[in-house]
Image (cartoon, helix red, strand yellow):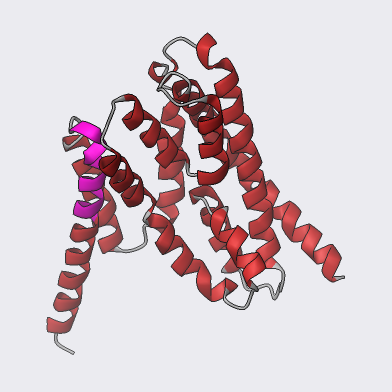
Amino acid sequence: MPLSLRRQEFIRGVRDTLPLLLGAFPFGLIYGAVAVTSGLSLAAAMAMSAFVFAGSSQFIAVGLVAARTPVAIIVLTTLIVNLRHMLYSATLLPYLKNLSQKWRIPLAFWLTDETFAVTVHRFQQADGSTEKHWYQLGSSVAMYLNWQFWCWSGLMLGTKIPNASEWGLDVAMPVTFIGMIIPFVKTIPMAVCILTAGAASLLTLTLPYKLGIVVSAFVGIAAGFMAERNLKKTKGALPQ
C-alpha cells in the first residue's frame, strides 16, 4: 500500500506540473540560444543549467555576462532574485520538517516557483496522505528534466536561431509567474506589495545591469510591510 501511494503521489505531482512546463520551454530555449552568444562556453552554460537550476537567475546572469557586468553586481542581482526561495522553504518547512536530510536536500535544490505553486496546495489538502513529499518529488523531477531538455536544445540550436532574445518568446515566463501569484493574493498588503513592485519594475526598466529588479524587490517588500503595519494600526484603533 505505501509503495502504491508513493507512486500515485509522484505521478500526480508530474501530472499537475505539466501545464506549467509550457511556460518554461521558450524561456529555456532562449536561455540556451543566448548563452552560446554571450561568451559562456557550452560546458559552462550547461553546467549552470544543471547545477544552478534557476531559470530567471540564469537568464539574468547570462545577459549580465554578455554586458561585461562586474561580478559583484551579477552575484548581488542573482542573490536578490533568488531570495524568494527562502520564503518558499519557510512555507514548506512545517510539512517537510520530519523528513531526513537525504530527502530535504534534493527537494530544496529542485524547488522552483512552479513546483512550489502546485506543492503548497497539495500539502494544504487535508486528505490524510503521509507521502505528499513524493508529490513534490514528481513535480520537481518533471520541471528539472523539462528545463534541462530545452536549455540543451537552445544550446544546440543557438547559432541557428538569429536574435532569439528578440522573438518575444520569453513573455511566457512572466505570464506563468502572474498565473502562479494570483491565487496567493488574498490580503491587502500582498496586493500592495505586488502592485508596487510591478510599477517599480516598469519605472526602473532602463537601469543598467538589471538593477531595476533589485530596486523593485525592495520597494515592493517595503510597501507590503508598511501596508500591513498600517492595517494593524487601523484595526487596533477601531472601537471594540
Q: Is residue 238 visible?
A: no
Q: Is residue 102 visible?
A: yes
Quarter holding residue 183: bottom left
Q: Position of 160 compared to 229: left or right?
A: right
Image coordinates of residue 84 in percent, x first then y, are 38, 56
Q: Nearer the viewer, residue 25 or 226?
A: 25
Q: Residue at x 46, y 25 (%)?
A: 35
> Magenta span has 213?
yes
Q: Residue at x 52, y 67 (%)?
A: 92
Q: Position of 80 compared to 224: left or right?
A: right
Query: Which segment is the magenta one?
Result: 208-220
Image coordinates of residue 236 in percent, x first then y, are 16, 83
- In the rendered view, would you say 60 is above or below 154? below
Image coordinates of residue 6 in percent, x first then y, are 78, 63
Image coordinates of residue 13 in percent, x first then y, are 67, 53
Q: Nearer the viewer, residue 158 or 75?
A: 75
- In the rendered view, would you say 172 is above or below 157? below
Quarter holding residue 133: bottom right
Q: Position of 138 compared to 233: left or right?
A: right
